[in-house]
Image: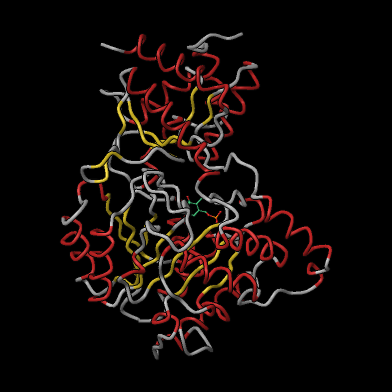
Amino acid sequence: MNKVPLNREAVDKIIADNKIKSVGKASIREVKKIIDDVEKAFDFRFVRMEMGIPGLPTVKQGVDAQIQALKDGVSAIYPDIYGTAELKHETKRFVKNFLDVDVPEDSCVPVTGSMQGSFASFMTVTKMDAKKNKLLFIDPGFPVQKQQCKILGIATETFDVYQYRGEKLRAKLESYLQTGEIAGIVYSSPNNPAWFCFNDEELKIIADLANQYDVVIMEDLAYFGMDFRKDISQPGVAPFQPTVAKWAKKYILMISGSKAFSYAGERIAVIVISPELYAWHTDYMKTYFAQDTFGRAIVFGSIYALSSGTSHSVQYGLAAVMKACNDGTYNLVEALRDYEKKAKFMKDALVENGFEIVYDKDQDVPIADGFYFTFNYPGMTGEQTLNELVYYGISAICLDITGSDQQGLRACVSLVPHEMLPVFAERVKQFNIDHKK
Ligand SMILES: Cc1ncc(COP(=O)(O)O)c(C=O)c1O
């Protein structure tokens, strides 16, 4: 059994063979490949925290309904591009039950994962007004969404919200919106990577300014219900998942099946388009779309061009999961609490051993324990911490690649099995013994 730290020269050779100068600068997939290689070469198991893959089985009601749909023959038939009646109906109920927001079924459109939801949204939102063609990202964020903008040729503005929580957010946001060039605002809450959550005060600020400057908000709810400080699992009963939709006129909510229902492999999400945005019409949009409203343009223009709809059978699967949540026969929060337990253990182990949590508070309230957390070793940059941790059998990704200005790493708890938690604690203890000054 190898002891940590691992032989540095041997690890360094594997990193060099991967043509990487520093693990701390590598992308998520590059980190994964290097760690795969080190694990193989040393016959040694890492505590792997680099990738955000769900670590739980898909909700049973979904799998059962999807299998039934396949047996019924839906795979032979193109799905309606605007979604199956069942999924549209259950999404409308879900939005009412868990967000306390009323939308018509027309507003609820399935996509092949939130990844497609954001791609289609970015494409469409920036083609409504010739002058408004940039997107503003409230960072840190999910790096692939910036990659989507790059591919689409969409210019982006970004800022790290770390110093701009609460009322300070207003002036910062307004400084970008005043340019008149911003078509939409993008953020996730709970946030990937930092796991902070915007509260009602902040969401109202975002909504008020977006309404004032006629900007579309794209709220990414990939981690729906996972702010475990509040149990939002009871249908139709407060508290609800906080959302900008309470106040905003033009918004798109992205509700992914991947993390909340561990449905990542089937690529399914639903976008919820506000009625006002759905009906929005501009002359400029005719340059790109035959349709004359935003809602019809994103469905029959963008989504049609991308994939002509979403896999038929999984729409039945997600509809069944949402129905179970809506009927109160499945508790969406309880099933996910395993992430909370693991995050608490790991954060405690880090803090006891000299590390610090980077994004640690929602204003004055400690952030929730959940799918991700951020941490660093004092006196080191995030890159240095990650480069060193690799010798100790721990992997993560550097915050640098997420648009964060803070030094540190993002850890994802989902793929760390419970039996590795004591191993993790031993390794961070050894790291601290070897590095403390
Ligand atoms: C913030 C955020 N948005 C979107 C996604 C992707 O969601 P989907 O699997 O539905 O495409 C992820 C996945 O990690 C995410 O973290």
Q: Position of residue 247 (x, y in %)?
A: 30, 71
Vertical comparison of 174 with 82: above or below: above
Quadrant containing the N terminus is top right
Q: Position of residue 186 (x, y in %)?
A: 37, 61
The residue depicted at 78 percent of the width and 74 percent of the height is 77
The residue depicted at 23 percent of the width and 59 percent of the height is 201
- Please state which of residues 348 and 206 is positioned toward the viewer in this rendering: 348
Horizontally, residue 248 falls left or right of residue 150, namely left
Vertical comparison of 392 with 234: above or below: above
- For the image, the number of numbered tags is 0
The residue depicted at 42 percent of the width and 76 percent of the height is 274
- Please state which of residues 125 and 314 is positioned toward the viewer in this rendering: 314
> Which quadrant of the figure has residue 246?
bottom left
The residue depicted at 43 percent of the width and 26 percent of the height is 345
Quadrant containing the C terminus is top left
Horizontally, residue 153 falls left or right of residue 296, namely left
Vertical comparison of 117 with 2: above or below: below
Horizontally, residue 191 falls left or right of residue 79, namely left
Q: Position of residue 175 (x, y in %)?
A: 18, 64
